[in-house]
Amino acid sequence: MNLFDVYPLFDVNIVKGKGCHVWDDKGNEYLDLYGGHAVISIGHAHPHYVESISHQVATLGFYSNSVINRLQQQLAERLGKISGYDDYSLFLINSGAEANENALKLASFHTGRTRVISFNKAFHGRTSLAVEATDNPKIIAPINANGHITYLPLNDIEAMQTELAKRDVCAVIIEGIQGVGGIRIPSDDFLHALRDACTKYGTILILDEIQSGYGRTGKFFAHQHSGIRPDIITIAKGIGNGFPMAGVLISPMFKAVCGQLGTTFGGNHLACSAALAVIDVFEQEHLVENAAKVGNYLLEQLKQVKGIKEVRGKGLMIGLEFEEPIKELRLRLLHEQYVFTGASGTNVLRLLPPLCLSMEEAKEFINRLNKVL
Ligand SMILES: Cc1ncc(COP(=O)(O)O)c(C=O)c1O
């Protein structure tokens, strides 16, 4: 059997990782400024993480959601504290798309409405509602195009208020910082106006923090830079440091209805042990603070580098926009300088390193970038 050929692949076989470095099968060492697409939060093969999931799988890897799972309860409590949302409830699933799917369902159950506002260049995943809310016609199949979504320009307060004033919008879904869309940041004014309009017109505000959350921007959630509080927050990527897991943080205004949501794998024992180990390391190694410190340094330094049109981002979620396509630059970084980076569209280089990136590693990245510019 062949693999279903949907991914454009780099010709590299990564076989090992440690901290912010990965190795290929030929023994070449790479600096990882991509974090496996923003997934590696505490670093590759962290010893505490390895020990925690090894112990759990040797004890009990899985049992279904039909029994008490104390690890889920511990995770909800610890996540509530570290994120500043201890009055919210947690629903666990396995992927970012599923988190958004459940968030949108909850909003619709709650309001009885079916219209959703999303934004130009948004990415929310590939399942039915999540992909419909994604502004990319190429990945929306005819069966997903059900007319639920109105896309608006990001940061256009008037357009947003006009739509919400119709009082028929179930939810607004917005990324803390748009990742796939090119590291585009909702302004504080926009988020405040959005929060007010959602409250006024009975619309649920969903913050997709799947890429921008879990400490990446130097606060636990990107929207916390503006001080607003959404009704629902979706998380994935960094929560399990590579173990597939995701969550929906749900405000106390929602009452849980037995049987309304559910999943086989979500919140299983092994996933919870991974997520608990991640929170241990966040606390012990002050990774949110590190993302702010090293991220600010990188942002400042990158603004001095010649040849970059614009540097955007917060913490360790950074986009470097170039005048010309970056395909070649990215390949040279990989094959000549042994640096992994991400991309958004054709002209933006996207940096999403593990949150444990050190100042030395940040400096080393700038050195290597300068060599290919
Ligand atoms: C902002 C955002 N939302 C949702 C998703 C979908 O997550 P997953 O691929 O885990 O379904 C992603 C993935 O890149 C994302 O960046």
Image (cartoon, grey):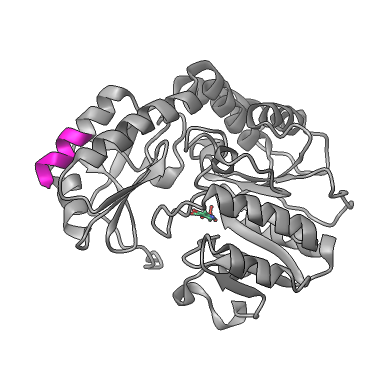
- Say left or right for 181 vs 65: left
- Say left or right for 102 vs 310: right
Where residue 347 appears, x then y in whole percent?
A: 27, 60
Q: Is residue 209 above or below residue 295?
A: below
Extreme residue in the bottom direction: 142
Q: Is residue 89 above or below residue 128?
A: above
Q: Which residues are magenta?
A: 366-373
- Say left or right for 183 vs 28: right
Q: Residue at x 66, y 47 (%)?
A: 233
The secondary structure making up most of the magenta span is helix
Where residue 4 appears, x then y in whole percent?
A: 41, 67
Q: Quadrant of residue 197?
A: bottom right
Q: Is residue 84 above or below residue 48?
A: below
Where residue 228 appears, x then y in whole percent?
A: 65, 43
Q: Residue at x 74, y 70 (%)?
A: 165
- For residue 221: magenta? no
Q: Residue at x 48, y 77 (%)?
A: 137
Q: Residue at x 72, y 29 (%)?
A: 71
Where residue 139 appears, x then y in whole percent?
A: 48, 73
